[in-house]
Image (spheres, rainbow, N blue to C red):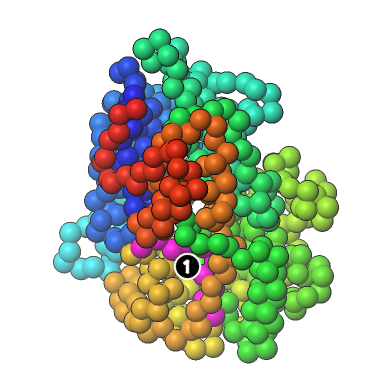
């Protein structure tokens, strides 16, 4: 068995991990790369392997950096099954259709404003996404009933709840080779015990010699989740007093629903004033409508507040879901105080760019960063204090106050990751992915001390390992 790492190596985007065994190619995730525009364009247009050599895909969850290149895979000749949970299939369809739509409109915008330059074409179109949807094969979390899903006569797997976003899964793989069996685990992206709405991550029960594990926050300990409510309360009350606009870049999946939930609870508790709250992501609106149908995946705290009525949780009087582009643009001329939540979460496309373009130069405004910002993204540049910043190839001075909510991270921290790896029985090889080099190196040192019987690897792009 050979594993080759084709993405999320010393960075947190473009997850693609290829397992080859007995002539069969099994790809774990097939995600978009997000970073420098020229690098992202090059990597996302060109797969690093032959699509025809991939026989099946296991998709851990529906974030774009894990599923965004599936249309490119299909466009280039993949015809196999894509295994994922039912919630992931439902959400990934929306994510990918939105990605195709954004590419179309962004290309039209750039082409109309860049006279004399070579026109830009979308990487894929909606018809490519529809072919991906036809490949989905949904599989429920199977830890409760002990069931396995067969991919072929030599490979079978189970899904465990990863607690990262709705439908996210960790994978337990059993691969038969040379009259023996090899077990491999893939964490996908791991959540945290106290995340709003979702259940805590489940532990993989089977032994595994090899673990491919995300390590986004390998050198960070998160603050307790309850602190998030106090911080959000202070930010909203400050905005109300100063009549500020709070501009929030947020992933349409996960972070948007968490923010709605937190703001709703604070309003219920009369802890914050009822500012207008605009969810300016049609994709986020569509995804939020899926949540009430999946309350069986929610935690006990949610059910204590809202029971099984997910609709009540994600709708309240001062919350407005923005639909049209015209309505979105009208917010730029609206006086504060109000909150606008828009995608994308790393400020790499979509409506957030227009809100930042129009609002980042106003010292009365607040830009609230709520999630991990990958290296070279606009969100990372704003977070690190770059000034001015380039939006749509024009420079804008940063005068707005930049605030950060690290507590809302949907990724496991150092202790969570260490405990997860320690809980895998029979572990010999640990591969750290979905992480930048400083985080990976710091965690690797800790893991080697705490788990001296395992080999810790930090793969390079395109690096292969025989197991």
Horizontally, residue 93 falls left or right of residue 99, namely: right
Q: Picture quarter containing residue 16?
A: top left
Residue drawn at 82 percent across, 70 percent down: 269
Instruction: Confirm whether residue 78 shows in the render.
Output: no
- Total count of labels: 1
Crowd around label 1: few <14 · some 14–19 · many ≥20 (10 Å): many
In this picture, is 268 found above or below 427?
below
In this picture, is 236 found above or below 9?
below
Q: Which residue is mark 1?
A: 352
Q: Position of residue 96 (x, y in %)?
A: 45, 45
Residue drawn at 78 percent across, 48 percent down: 300
In this picture, is 64 found above or below 231?
above
Residue drawn at 45 percent across, 38 percent down: 453
Q: Main secondary structure of the magenta part?
A: loop
Q: Picture quarter containing residue 181?
A: top left
Q: Which residues are magenta?
A: 366-375
Instruction: Confirm whether residue 28 shows in the render.
Output: yes
Q: Is residue 373 magenta?
A: yes
Q: Is residue 425 magenta?
A: no
The quarter of the rendered structure image containing the C terminus is: top left
Q: Position of residue 157 (x, y in %)?
A: 52, 25
Residue drawn at 41 percent across, 46 percent down: 432
């Amino acid at each position: 068995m050979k594993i080759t790492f084709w993405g999320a190596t010393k960075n947190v985007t473009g997850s693609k991990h290829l397992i080859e065994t007995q002539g069969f190619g099994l790809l774990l995730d097939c995600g978009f790369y997000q970073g420098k525009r020229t690098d992202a364009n090059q990597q996302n247009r060109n797969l690093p392997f032959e699509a025809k050599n991939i026989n099946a895909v296991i998709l851990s969850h529906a974030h774009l950096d894990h599923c965004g290149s599936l249309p490119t895979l299909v466009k280039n000749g993949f015809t196999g099954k894509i295994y994922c949970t039912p919630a992931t299939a439902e959400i990934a369809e929306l994510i990918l259709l939105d990605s195709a739509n954004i590419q179309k409109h962004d290309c039209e915008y750039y082409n109309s404003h860049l006279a004399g330059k070579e026109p830009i074409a979308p990487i894929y179109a909606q018809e490519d996404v529809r072919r991906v949807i036809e490949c989905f094969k949904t599989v429920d979390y199977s830890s409760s009933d002990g069931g396995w899903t067969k991919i072929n006569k030599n490979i079978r797997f189970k899904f465990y709840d990863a607690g990262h976003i709705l439908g996210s899964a960790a994978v337990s793989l059993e691969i038969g080779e040379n009259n023996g069996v090899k077990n491999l685990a893939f964490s996908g992206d791991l959540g945290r015990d106290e995340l709003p709405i979702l259940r805590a991550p489940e532990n993989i029960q089977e032994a595994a010699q090899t673990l491919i594990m995300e390590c986004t926050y390998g050198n960070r300990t998160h603050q307790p989740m309850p602190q998030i409510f106090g911080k959000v309360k202070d930010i909203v009350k400050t905005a109300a007093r100063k009549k500020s606009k709070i501009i929030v870049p947020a992933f349409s999946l996960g972070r948007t629903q968490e923010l709605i939930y937190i703001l709703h609870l604070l309003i219920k508790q009369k802890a914050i004033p009822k500012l207008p709250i605009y969810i300016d992501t049609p994709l986020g609106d569509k995804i939020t409508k899926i949540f009430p149908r999946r309350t069986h995946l929610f935690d006990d705290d949610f059910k204590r507040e809202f029971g099984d009525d997910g609709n009540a949780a994600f709708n309240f009087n001062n919350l407005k879901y923005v639909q049209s582009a015209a309505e979105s643009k009208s917010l730029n001329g609206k006086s504060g105080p109000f909150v606008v939540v828009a995608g994308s979460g790393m400020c790499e496309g979509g409506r957030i760019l227009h809100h930042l373009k129009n609002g980042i130069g106003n010292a009365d405004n607040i830009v609230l960063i709520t999630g991990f910002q990958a290296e070279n993204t606009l969100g990372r540049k704003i977070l690190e204090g770059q000034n001015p910043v380039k939006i749509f190839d024009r420079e804008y001075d940063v005068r707005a106050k930049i605030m950060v909510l690290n507590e809302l991270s949907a990724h496991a921290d150092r202790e969570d990751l260490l405990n997860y790896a320690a809980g895998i029985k029979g572990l010999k090889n640990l591969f750290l992915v979905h992480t930048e080099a400083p985080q990976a190196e710091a965690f690797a040192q800790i893991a080697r001390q705490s788990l001296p019987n395992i080999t810790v690897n930090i793969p390079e792009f395109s690096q292969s390992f025989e197991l």
